[in-house]
Amino acid sequence: MTIDKTLLTKTLFALGIGGIGGLIANWLTMPLPWMLGPMVVCTIASLLKLPVNGPNKIRPAMITILGVMLGSGFSPDMLQRAGEWTISLALLAAYVGLGGALCYPYFRKIAGYDRPTAYFAAMPGGLNEMMVIGHEMGGDDRRIVLTHASRVLLTVLCIPIFFRLTMHIDMADRSRFGVALTDVSLQDYLLLTSCILGYPAAKYLRIPAPMLVGPMLASAALHLSGTTATQPPIVIVSLAQWVMGTVIGCRFAGIARREVLRTIAMSVGSTAILLGLTAVFAVFVSWLAGIPVISVVLAYAPGGLAEMSLVALALGTDVAFVATHHIVRIVYVIIAAPMAYRAWMKRLSKTGG
């Protein structure tokens, strides 16, 4: 296999400056320093047209590691609380539908997107799925993916910093992200490594985001059953975050700066709409179901599954609750969005709209 040296150099450069961003963010005791630091630095580098390229080839391995780590947030006592989530999971469907309904006219009238592009860009989740389905429905897949990438970037950046500034949380304590390499026994290493097999199983079963969800479910099964209570080593988890943050920041590389800045500007408005809606639902669900507001905010926030689960971990909230809601949100979006769009187009064709 021939190695593209230019591409490799760009990737190593991106990881290098991303690592510097991680060190600075860690020094500033920011939440998720090894993801937010590289993400911010590489986004700036992309806008400045510096020679950066995301380490996409190693991203799958890093995602499976994050899946195993997120699964370690499940514990046997969680089974006793699972029934408490019924109300919030049911209302999540209303949040997804209302979020899309509010963002669609924004993208249509203010951003000037065509109908299918505006529709699939408005969905509060499913970046890759909305890009593919939106393209099949006649939308601009590049604009859709840029809009969703901007939404994830803004959400992941704003929420942890907001809670960092408004809550008394010790961000210097990184212990909840994992343990030392020497604190994991050989048996536990083998058990955690075996969770990677959850990826092909989830892919075969067509579970959304199988690369992350498969290992997470396998890890959750081990931790729920009490087979192990061990987390992956913090060094490996930090490495995974570093790669993920670099990939997110480099998504904007090679795209005209004007297009990126305009898309991010448009996404500020749509993300503000979704975050405002998140706050309303969080207060209502917290009052109705007795679940802490911060947990509901992270569970409903329009960020990515891996990213928001990591934020939950950083803030010491219920990772299992947050991850489960984001998985269900993706399922809602993937199933309902195309069906609703086809039904809408069919109705418009009959009425001549």
Image (cartoon, helix red, strand yellow):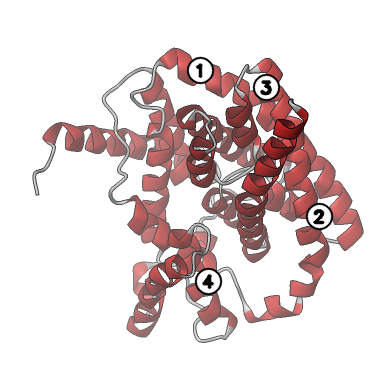
- Quadrant of the image occupied by residue 13: top left
Residue located 59% across and 19% down the image: 265
**Depth check, front residue: 254 or 162:** 254
Whole-number angstrom distance, CA of label 2 to CA of label 3: 26 Å
| The C terminus - image quarter | top right
**Depth check, front residue: 67 or 350:** 350
- Quadrant of the image occupied by residue 221: bottom right
Amino acid type, mark 3: Arg
Q: Nearer the viewer, mark 2 or mark 4?
A: 2
Q: Which residue is mark 4?
A: 217
The answer to whether residue 207 is left or right of residue 286 is left
Whole-number angstrom distance, CA of label 1 to CA of label 2: 34 Å
Q: Earlier in the sequence, mark 2 or mark 3?
A: 2
* Element type at mark 3: helix
Q: Earlier in the sequence, mark 3 or mark 1?
A: 3
Give the numbered dot on residue 91: 2
The reply to whether the C-beta atoms of the residues labelled 3 and 1 are less than 8 Å apart is no
Q: Earlier in the sequence, mark 2 or mark 4?
A: 2
Q: Which residue is mark 1?
A: 261
Q: Which residue extends farthest left?
A: 2
Residue located 50% across and 86% down the image: 227
Q: Judge the density around disc 4: few (<14), some (14-19), many (≥20) Cα neighbours within 10 Å.
A: many
Amino acid type, mark 1: Leu
**Depth check, front residue: 347 or 298:** 347
* Element type at mark 4: helix
Relative to 196, residue 268 above or below: above
Res 261 visible: yes
